[in-house]
Every structure is written in structure tokens, then in C-alpha cells.
């Protein structure tokens, strides 16, 4: 059977690949500790589950409008307006089956073949793959650990060509946990003023998961006049422990939302009705559970960061958001582990700890570890990592 070139060209998710292999080993009886997947290990808060149950009993089992139920679009618009400091109307919000579908819809609606997208790296690999699937070209713009993975705005400027259509930002970042500083965003605002044809898409899915001294800053809060050139991607999955509910939001000027509505109407129609009612409860209900999750993630973050930086020849930039650490393990590459992909395989098979290689995020020589796990699992996981790295060093 001949498959479409657009699908054959896609790179499988390295995170899911490692997680799947870890599950295989567990099924075979191995004691595997996984620090791979980016999802909270908490239960969805009780008031959200209750709202979903009540919605089912009220008959929330039918199609909804493609863009989402009116109440949820209004709640999302109000929430995003407060965060970004501009007036976002409900008709400028679309509800989709997760933030990933929002990204897909927006990129499919914005990009023509050959259009270029500036993509600061390290970054979530789906950003680049979704650009490619839309016919675009992901122009990678690397940052370094020496700068704390700060975006190199001058590099962005040099990468702009007549085909550049879009700049994609993500704060906090998956995989580094970096929160874009206000000073950097002000440089981005200047860049956008100098290139009025350039649009910007911000993936803000982790914006509620920020730890002192980090602070989420909105590009629009710095320059409200940019509304009209900015596409906001948001959702409830990470902040409310709702990854499986699959609800994401996109806020954008009405013409783009209309185009995405037309596209989604031919693909998935609406997001699940009951999940929309659950997301409505998340936005309008008690925010204390999210605050508690943030406090717990912060404590876990400190424990994992200290443990990683205690490993000889390992260094890790302090993550100020999301729930990932991204340590540099390049000193251990060579011999039995010539690159970070082989190193992650060795650690899984021989040290019984699953981590994700940095190459999957366009940052070879690094590993991504998730601290969306209990403290005992974090402590044991990093212990196994240290032992595995020591074994690799001894064998090289």
C-alpha cells in the first residue's frame, strides 16, 4: 500500500515512543520508572468531575456548534482578556479537541506551501511537525543553556526572509521550562514593528504553571495594538489535570476563527460535549486545586533540580514553569552511548528509568525529565539516572 508523502515525512513522537517501550518492559515484568510523559499525576478536581456528571444527566450527549458551546467561548474569552489585557470577544474564540488541534487548525488555515515559520528551539516537536504538515517550513532558531535558553531575537531577525509568515512562541517552554522574560518580549515587539507582515502564534498551555521568580508576560499586554496579528493557543489540560478531556482554545481575529471553523467542521466537528461543560467548570469554578498543584510542582521542581545538578558532569538550567527539567548530559556521550537517543535507550534498558532524549526537541546532548510524578518516584528516578550515567562513563 502506498502512503501519502505528507504522512511518511512526519517524525514520530519520541516522547510517546519512549513511553510505549517503557510500558512494554513493565508488561514483561520489569521494574521501570518513567519520567517521560507531560501530564499531571493528579485527579481532575472534584467540582469539574461533578459538573461533567451533571451535564451528562442534563443531556449533554449531542453535537454542539463547531466552535464550541456559547458559554465556554464566553468564559474563555473573559479569561484570556484578563490575562492578555485586550478585549477578546467570544466570537474570536474557538474550542477544539485539545490545544494540539488548535495548532493544527490555525497552521492549516494560515500557511501556504513554502511559507516559513520561525521556531525558537529547544521546542516541543509537534510544533515543527504541524508546520510541515501544513506545507510550511520550520526555520529553527536555537538558543543555548548559557543564556538560560533565552530566545535570541537577533537570530530571529537574521532568519526573516520574504517567505517568513509566522513566529511561534511558547512560554513556559516544553522541554526547558523557560519562561520568556519581559525584556525579551519587548525585543520581540520591536521585531514585529519592523516586520509588519509577520504574525505571531503563542502556545500558552503552561502559563498557569509558573514558579517564583518566574512570571508569565503576555506579548499583547506589552502592545495591545498587536491584537490582529497574534494567535493565542490555550487550554485546560495541564493546569486542571484534564489531559484526557481534550479541550483547547484558540483566540484570534474573527477571519481566522471563521476559517478554522470551516476546517474543523470537515474534520472533527465539535469537541466532546461533556468535556466542554467540564472545561467551563474549570474556568469558572474554584481555582484552589490549581494553586495547590502549582505549589506541589514547585516543591518537586526544586527536588529534581537539586538532584540533577548534584550528578557529576551534569548541569541543568533552572526551569521556572511547566513541569520539566532539561539537563545537559553531553559529557556522558560516546562509547556505549554515542548520542542522547542511544543514551536514553541505555538508561531504559539497563538502568530501568525512562527519560526523553533532547534530540527530539532539537537539542542533542540533553534529556527531558518530567516532575509530574511523586517525590519518591522523582528521587528514585534521578538515582537510577545517576547510576546509569556512572555505568556509561565507566564503560567508555
Image: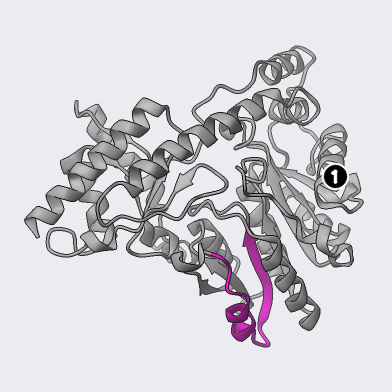
Asked if residue 27 lies left or right of residue 396, the reply is: right
Residue 231 lies in what quarter of the image? bottom right
Q: How is the image coloured?
A: one colour
- The location of residue 260, given as percent across then percent down, is 76, 55
Q: How many marks?
A: 1
- The location of residue 229, given as percent across then percent down, is 81, 67
Residue 244 visible here:
yes
Residue 23 visible here:
no
Q: Please give the residue where the numbered disc 1 appears in the rendered image.
A: 82
Q: 389 and 54: which one is in front?
A: 389
Asked if residue 283 lies left or right of residue 291, the reply is: right
Segment colored magenta: 150-170
Up/down of 387 relative to 157, above or below: above
Question: Could you tell me which residue is drawn at 48 percent across and 53 percent down?
Answer: 175
Residue 396 lies in what quarter of the image? bottom left
Question: Could you tell me which residue is drawn at 55 percent across and 60 percent down?
Answer: 127
The quadrant of the image that shows the N terminus is: bottom left
- The location of residue 187, given as percent across then percent down, is 71, 73
Give the secondary structure at mark 1.
Answer: helix
Does residue 205 show up magenta in the picture? no
Q: Residues within 10 Å of mark 1 (few under 14, many from 20)?
A: few
Does residue 157 show up magenta in the picture? yes
Up/down of 277 relative to 116, above or below: above
Up/down of 395 relative to 243, above or below: below
Q: 35 and 129: which one is in front?
A: 35
Asked if residue 183 lies left or right of residue 134, the reply is: right
- The location of residue 350, given as percent across then percent down, is 15, 42
Amino acid at each position: 500500500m502506498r502512503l501519502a508523502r505528507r504522512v511518511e515525512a512526519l517524525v514520530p513522537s519520541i516522547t510517546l515512543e519512549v513511553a510505549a517501550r517503557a510500558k512494554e518492559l513493565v508488561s514483561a515484568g520489569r521494574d521501570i520508572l518513567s519520567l517521560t510523559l507531560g501530564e499531571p499525576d493528579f485527579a481532575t478536581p472534584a467540582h469539574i468531575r461533578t459538573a461533567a456528571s451533571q451535564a451528562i444527566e442534563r443531556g449533554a450527549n449531542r453535537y454542539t456548534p463547531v466552535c464550541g458551546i456559547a458559554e465556554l467561548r464566553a468564559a474563555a474569552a473573559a479569561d484570556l482578556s484578563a490575562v492578555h489585557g485586550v478585549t477578546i470577544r467570544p466570537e474570536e474564540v474557538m474550542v477544539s479537541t485539545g490545544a494540539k488541534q488548535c495548532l493544527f487548525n490555525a497552521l492549516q488555515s494560515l500557511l501556504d506551501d513554502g511559507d516559513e515559520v520561525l521556531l525558537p528551539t529547544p521546542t516541543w516537536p509537534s510544533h515543527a511537525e504541524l508546520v510541515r504538515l501544513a506545507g510550511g517550513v520550520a526555520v529553527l532558531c536555537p538558543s543555548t543553556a548559557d543564556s538560560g535558553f533565552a530566545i535570541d531575537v537577533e537570530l530571529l531577525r537574521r532568519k526573516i526572509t520574504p517567505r517568513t509568515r509566522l513566529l511561534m512562541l511558547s512560554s513556559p517552554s516544553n522541554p526547558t521550562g523557560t519562561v520568556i522574560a519581559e525584556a525579551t518580549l519587548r525585543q520581540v515587539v520591536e521585531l514585529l514593528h519592523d516586520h509588519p507582515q509577520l504574525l505571531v502564534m503563542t502556545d500558552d498551555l503552561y502559563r498557569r504553571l509558573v514558579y517564583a521568580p518566574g512570571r508569565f508576560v503576555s506579548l499583547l499586554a506589552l502592545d495591545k495594538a498587536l491584537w490582529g496579528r497574534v494567535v493565542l493557543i490555550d487550554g485546560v489540560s495541564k493546569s486542571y489535570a484534564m489531559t484526557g478531556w481534550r479541550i483547547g482554545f484558540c483566540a484570534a481575529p474573527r477571519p481566522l476563527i471563521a476559517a478554522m471553523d470551516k476546517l474543523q467542521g470537515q474534520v472533527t466537528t465539535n469537541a466532546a460535549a461533556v468535556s466542554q461543560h467540564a472545561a467551563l467548570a474549570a474556568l469558572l469554578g474554584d481555582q484552589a486545586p490549581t494553586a495547590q498543584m502549582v505549589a506541589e510542582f514547585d516543591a518537586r521542581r526544586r527536588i529534581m533540580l537539586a538532584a540533577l545538578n548534584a550528578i557529576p558532569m551534569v548541569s541543568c538550567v533552572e526551569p521556572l514553569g511547566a513541569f520539566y527539567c532539561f539537563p545537559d548530559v553531553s559529557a556522558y556521550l560516546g562509547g556505549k552511548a554515542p548520542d542522547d537517543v542511544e543514551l536514553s535507550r541505555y538508561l531504559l534498558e539497563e538502568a530501568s528509568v525512562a527519560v526523553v532524549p533532547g534530540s527530539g526537541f532539537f537539542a542533542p546532548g540533553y534529556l527531558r525529565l518530567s516532575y509530574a510524578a511523586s517525590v519518591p518516584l522523582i528521587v528514585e528516578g534521578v538515582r537510577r539516572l545517576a547510576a546509569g550515567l556512572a555505568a556509561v562513563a565507566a564503560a567508555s
